[in-house]
Amino acid sequence: MATSKTFFYAKNLADVFYQLKTISDLTITGGCTSFVGKSLPEKTLSVRDIPELKIIDKHERYIDFGTAVTLAEIEELGEANLPPCLYKAITTVANPNVRFLATLGGNICRKEFFNTLYAPLLALDARLEFQNGNEAIFQNISRFEKIPEGMLLSKIRLPTEEWEVALFRRLGPSNSLNELSASFVFLANSQKNQISDLRISMAGSFKFRDTNLENKLIGAHLPLSQTAISNFLLEAEESFNNTTKDEKIAPILKRQFWNLIKYSLEQLT
Ligand SMILES: Cc1cc2nc3c(=O)[nH]c(=O)nc-3n(C[C@H](O)[C@H](O)[C@H](O)COP(=O)(O)OP(=O)(O)OC[C@H]3O[C@@H](n4cnc5c(N)ncnc54)[C@H](O)[C@@H]3O)c2cc1C
């Protein structure tokens, strides 16, 4: 039986909040590219053209992105003006036509899967802002589970500190997503030949980041010895298995995690 779909329209953010309050079961969308080949929700309102959500606001240590900024608009800023791991991740999403429509907000808010940009944003400690017109809630992306009731994701604050070693790897098929898809990010800085900051993240059908694990290498002298690498690999494997024990993960992704950590540690000199 055919079901009717209703598309709502808003010209500014105040309109969006009014509609969120007054229309039950309204789904906020961006470019709707994640619904290609699937059925759209009954009631949708696209925020892709809402001016207040299209801001790109550069500061000394971070950039604020409105959630309606498209992946193509971020890509246009260029690798030199973005954390390279995020820039590289964006260039692997779908194809230029999809990136022209797809929004940053839509990439983060997909339910039950962490899309390609999630791991870079997780490693970079991005902060999310949710709004409902009366209040704003800020949350580190590592704590993000779902959109708070009646709110929309309005802004992403992206720290822009520099990293001496910054690796991004996309796993699984190119330009589309399935259960073998995941993104891996490794970031490291050093001072006086000692590791001063380290971030490791991976996300797909699961998300992984363990700051306790990362802290185990802070202060380690470079280059790392083979024993230090082997010990860390054992701890990383244990942490990954613990974090993902309730998830159904293809065994190949576990092997790829291990190989990528080993490769990344060997880049530290
Ligand atoms: C051919 C093809 C290939 C693709 N390949 C990739 C890929 O390689 N990697 C990848 O990551 N993705 C891929 N995608 C999926 C998708 O295009 C991207 O993830 C895109 O960033 C989603 O953005 P969107 O604006 O279209 O989101 P939408 O489809 O509009 O929304 C996605 C979800 O987010 C919610 N949402 C959107 N904006 C907000 C907001 N502001 N507040 C609250 N909730 C919100 C929606 O309700 C929905 O649940 C692909 C899609 C296609 C069609």
Image (spheres, rainbow, N blue to C red):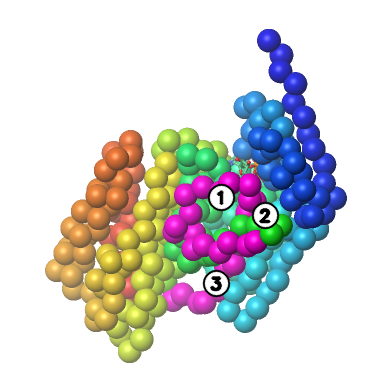
Residue displayed at 62% across by 27% down: 38
Point out which mark residue 148 bears: 1
Question: Which circle's residue, 2 or 3, is located before the other in the chain?
Answer: 2
Q: Nearer the viewer, mark 3 or mark 1?
A: 1
Identified at 47% across, 35% down, the residue is 178
Horizontal arrangement in the rendering, residue 88 relative to residue 252 (left or right): right
Q: Secondary structure at mark 1?
A: loop
Q: Which residue is mark 2?
A: 132
Which residue is identified by label 3? 159
As measured in the structure, the alpha-carbon distance from the residue carrying label 2 to the one carrying label 1 is 9 Å
Labelled pair 2, 1 in contact (Cβ < 8 Å): yes
Q: Disc 1 marks which amino acid? A: Pro
In the rendered image, the quadrant that contains the N terminus is: top right
Residue 122 pos. (x, y %)? 46, 60
Residue 131 falls in image quadrant: bottom right
Mark nearer the N terminus (3 vs 1): 1
- Mark 2 or 1, nearer chain start: 2
Labels 2 and 3 touching (C-beta < 8 A):
no
Q: Using the image, tell me which numbered label, if any, was put on residue 126.
A: none
Counting from the top left corner in percent of width and height, residue 100 is at 73, 48
User: Does any portion of residue 222 appear in the rendered image?
Assistant: no
Does the residue tagged 1 have its C-beta within 8 Å of any atom of ligand 1? no
How many residues crowd around disc 2 within 10 Å: few (fewer than 14), some, or many (20 or more)?
A: many
- Given the image, on which type of amino acid does mark 3 rest? Pro
